[in-house]
Image (tube, grey):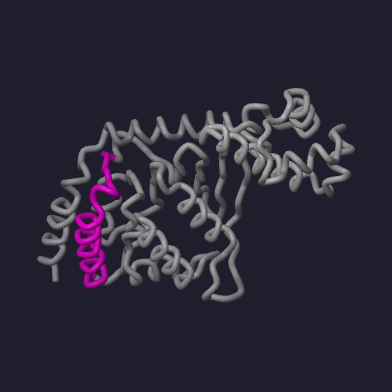
């Protein structure tokens, strides 16, 4: 069987299985409600099936369960859930990741082979030291420092895989404000800020070109915190919750918006280590 046909059948089977699960019904009831034979449904969901479904069958499934034909056949990412709100949830154990963090990490892994585009809330999480994460999360209402440190480590490990491709975009002002100890970092000891700048110099040099960090002028434009996981989905951080978009149109538009920021960048990825090193030297003079 040609590879394209196998991929098409695999995608259809996965998405049909998702539709069945989302219906909340067993297979027999699903077949009855959809007006198809139980044996037909069993065949379509079988990993050994090598036949594409009849047009009448997939049309019936799409109409009854309000999904698009394009999505069902793997031609679009706009499925039965085009957007959802994912709240941040605190876990009881400080050593157990919250469900939303587990899902985000899974999406990073699923996006391997695609480009991930990332606008951080402050500094890029995967570049942060434990001291900075602890400072930012010390009074946070949801995630604990321990959880965030584990997530940052997992994202760094993912980025070290040579098959990953991540672009980060943020403002020069956010980095400079950190170096000066302004805003949320007011009161953070100089020693901790120096260690953070050192780590960013080291990691941006090590991870380039798999990780490319672009800085733009925050006086000219604004970028909301968002992660775009290839062509599949985007997660907008709204503060204590994420808005998750899986519509292909939404993902394309956010990708285009992100790429506009990159084109306007005033500091390019190869120049990031030197740029941060200058900030570090200026900070060191204050000690």
> Viewer-proximal residue, 178 or 120?
120
Which quadrant of the view contains residue 156? bottom left
Residue name at image x 25 percent, y 37 percent: 265
Relative side of 104 to 120, left or right: right
Relative side of 156 to 4, left or right: left
Relative side of 256 to 69, left or right: left
> Viewer-proximal residue, 161 or 200?
161
Question: What stretch of residues is rendered in magenta?
Answer: 190-217
Q: Is 231 situated above or below 177? A: above
Q: Residue furthest top?
A: 55
Residue 63: x and y, percent? 77, 27
Q: Is residue 194 magenta?
A: yes
Which quadrant of the view contains residue 69? top right
Which quadrant of the view contains residue 78? top right
The secondary structure that dominates the magenta segment is helix
Q: Is 125 situated above or below 55? A: below
Relative side of 55 to 207, left or right: right
Residue name at image x 52 percent, y 41 percent: 233
Q: Is residue 41 magenta?
A: no
Residue 192: x and y, percent? 26, 71
């Amino acid at each position: 069987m040609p590879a394209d046909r196998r991929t098409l059948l695999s995608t259809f089977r996965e998405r049909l299985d998702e539709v069945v699960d989302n219906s909340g019904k067993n297979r027999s009831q699903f077949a009855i409600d959809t007006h198809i034979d139980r044996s037909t449904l069993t065949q379509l969901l079988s990993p050994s099936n090598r036949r594409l479904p009849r047009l009448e069958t997939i049309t019936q499934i799409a109409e009854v369960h309000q999904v698009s034909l394009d999505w069902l056949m793997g031609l679009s990412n706009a499925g039965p859930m085009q957007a959802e709100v994912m709240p941040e949830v605190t876990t009881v154990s400080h050593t157990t990741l919250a469900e939303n963090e587990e899902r985000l990490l899974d999406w990073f892994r699923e996006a391997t082979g695609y480009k991930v585009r990332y606008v951080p809330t402050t500094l890029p999480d995967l570049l942060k030291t434990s001291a900075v994460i602890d400072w930012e999360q010390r009074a946070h209402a949801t995630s604990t420092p321990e959880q965030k440190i584990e997530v940052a480590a997992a994202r760094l490990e993912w980025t070290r895989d040579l098959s990953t491709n991540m672009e980060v975009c943020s403002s020069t002002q956010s980095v400079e404000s950190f170096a000066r100890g302004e805003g949320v970092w007011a009161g953070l000891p100089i020693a901790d800020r120096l260690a953070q700048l050192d780590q960013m110099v080291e990691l941006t040099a090590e991870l380039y070109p798999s990780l490319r960090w672009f800085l733009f002028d925050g006086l000219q434009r604004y970028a909301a915190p968002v992660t775009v996981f290839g062509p599949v989905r985007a997660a907008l951080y709204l503060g204590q919750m994420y808005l998750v978009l899986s519509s292909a149109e939404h993902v394309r538009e956010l990708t285009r918006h992100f790429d506009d920021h990159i084109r306007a960048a005033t500091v390019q990825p190869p120049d990031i280590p030197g740029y941060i090193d200058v900030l570090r030297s200026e900070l060191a003079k204050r000690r």
